[in-house]
Image (cartoon, helix red, strand yellow):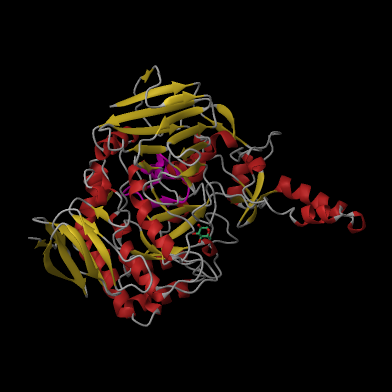
Amino acid sequence: MIKRFTFGTPTDTEAVLDKPAPCTFSDSRLIKTENGFRCTLFDREAVYGLGENVRGINKRGWTYTSDCSDDPHHQEDTHSLYGAHNFILLSGGSSLSEKLGIFIDTPSKVVFDIGYTDASELMITVDSPGFDLYVITAPSLLSAVTEFRQLIGKSYIPPFFAFGYGQSRWSYYSEDEIREVVSEYRRAGIPLDMVYMDIDYMDHYKDFTINEEVFPHFKEFVSEMRSQGIHLIPIIDGGVKLEPGYDVYEEGHRNGYFCKDENGEDFVIGVWPGDCCLPDMLNEEAGKWFGHKYKFLTDMGIDGFWNDMNEPALFYSKKNLTGIAQKIEAYDSQKQGINEVLSFKGIFEGVNNNPEDYASFYHDYKGKRYNHKDVHNLFGYYMTRRASESFDDFIDGEKPLLFSRSSYIGMHRYAGIWQGDNKSWWSHLKMNLQMMPSLNMCGFLYTGADIGGFGSDTTEDLLLRWLAVGIFTPLFRNHSASGTRRQEAYRFGDFEAFSDIIRLRYVLLPYLYNAYLDAANNNTLMFTPLSFLYPEDDIASEIEDQLFVGRDMMIAPVLEQNRTGRVVYLPEPMCLIRFKHTEAINEGCLDKGIHYVNIPLDEVVVFIKKGAGLPLGKPAQNLQCFDINDTYILNCD
Ligand code: GLC
């Protein structure tokens, strides 16, 4: 059962389109405090949800802040990543059968202190006095998720090619460099469906332009790639370069489409292109105007985009820099003590994503003026939603693939997300796995992390193990930052191992695609923690490095270096299927309980429910030459 409670005058985020009538709130398990709620947590009660966040699947024992942040340091002590996903789910502990789901619908900051300040207390602090609270009570964790997902609407389903393997790099600098990547993949016999184009395809990082020096015949190049089964997926950034004469800037400025400061002037921030203005993505007219700009690229045959820097990322504001320049000018080295020197040294600290800057510009949303800080968490959501809605105006057939870095619940209906700037760390491989169910709970199904790690240098074994997880995630993309070790799959000694694992994605696709559609159409999870399925099983309830993918398959990947296998817990008797050179070998049924399973670097092992049939396809060079109906069923008895 879902109940909605309204406090103050909420800003309508449109996370929920069909809102139930509000009820009158009275304290129950959830007790109203001055600026939020508190709730006593039961002994061993688990708390799930919160979508894109660090730490484990059970979120208990830390504080999470919904405040979309461009923070490349995804560490244990990080409080906010790129998305704001205010849905949590309490397992009820052993004494209670009723599960409790809580969704705080507000575009401003929300802090979830989940047994951090007081180990037995959940404290929710809501920045704004106006918000909607949705409370779900359900007999099981899965049914609570389904009720919530019904409330927020059906998840995005991307075009089929988006389930193939994609290679990305910041950046591929020319047509020839991309041609080389594609031909190297082909030479190594590794499938490839997409090549991602990072900011350097643009002219000086200006959205909706092409650097014609290095991409001189872009339209022809897009079709040349398509004839080889490759989709090119360019990046679009949230900030528009401030450059007189640049048509997107000129139009935005002339029509008043950019966010303004308190004096009504365009607010100037810095992102990759240098000085930029921010289109008011929340405003329907301005956001649609920006969304229509994607036509520049779809007219050239582009059918997929990734929206970036849309928290929005703010490297500096012109206002802040001007203040700093004045301080530098006034600096008198003769008159400074150590404290003045130290504070002078630190004057550039805090220039990035500065809270004062976020409070210095305004949006015109639903006919009302809002300070950005009060609607901060909606920027990436609306950038992406407006683009998706604009596609309807100029795309006849299927909409392009679309995913974003920043998001809010509601955006899951329009696009996917990637998990941002992770690192080539084994701990981030584990985090990738653990974020999948949390994101699914909040409606985000088309998601995945930068495989191999974005920042820092990857290793051959990390990339192989990461690919062996990535083959299960809907977004299956290898991406890395400039200056890091190259990590295209063909670059390593044992490229056959890479080829086997990536080809396996295609073999598994009939099962995985069905699992995706099932999760989208039935408002359920594609990645399910064991605790959701075996709540009575104390061991299963605490396992966070094994997941169900779809209804019949459990994965238990190797997540540590220098391991040739791992301990796996089977919550019921299951068949061990080993994939060797993409061939499926049924090693028979294992009993419920603890097992040690050998998993060499070039193999993948999955566990299938006894009696289930696993639909498998044939490896293919890409999805253009893949027939999802050409499958056979592996019987798992
Ligand atoms: C941001 C994105 C990353 C991209 C880079 C350059 O850091 O998260 O994926 O490669 O910007 O555009």
x and y percentages locating residue 311 in the rendered image: 53, 46
Judge whether 211 appears above or below 297 on screen: below
Which quadrant holds residue 433? bottom left
The residue at 28%/57% (across/down) is 546
Judge whether 635 appears above or below 70 on screen: below
The residue at 37%/77% (across/down) is 490
x and y percentages locating residue 606 in the rendered image: 21, 63
Q: Residue furthest top?
A: 24
Quarter holding the C terminus? bottom left
Q: Residue furthest front?
A: 43
| Residue range highlighted in magenta | 387-412
Numbered disc total: 0
Q: Is residue 319 left or right of residue 121?
A: right
Which quadrant holds residue 19? top left
Q: Is residue 608 left or right of residue 393?
A: left
Residue 527 shows in this picture: no
x and y percentages locating residue 20 in the rendered image: 34, 23
Q: Residue furthest bottom?
A: 493
| 397 in magenta | yes
x and y percentages locating residue 458 in the rendered image: 45, 71
| 221 in magenta | no
Residue 283 shows in this picture: yes
Q: Nearer the viewer, residue 393 or 461?
A: 461
Quarter holding the N terminus? top left
The residue at 38%/28% (across/down) is 134
Q: Residue furthest right?
A: 334
Q: Is residue 34 left or right of residue 596?
A: right
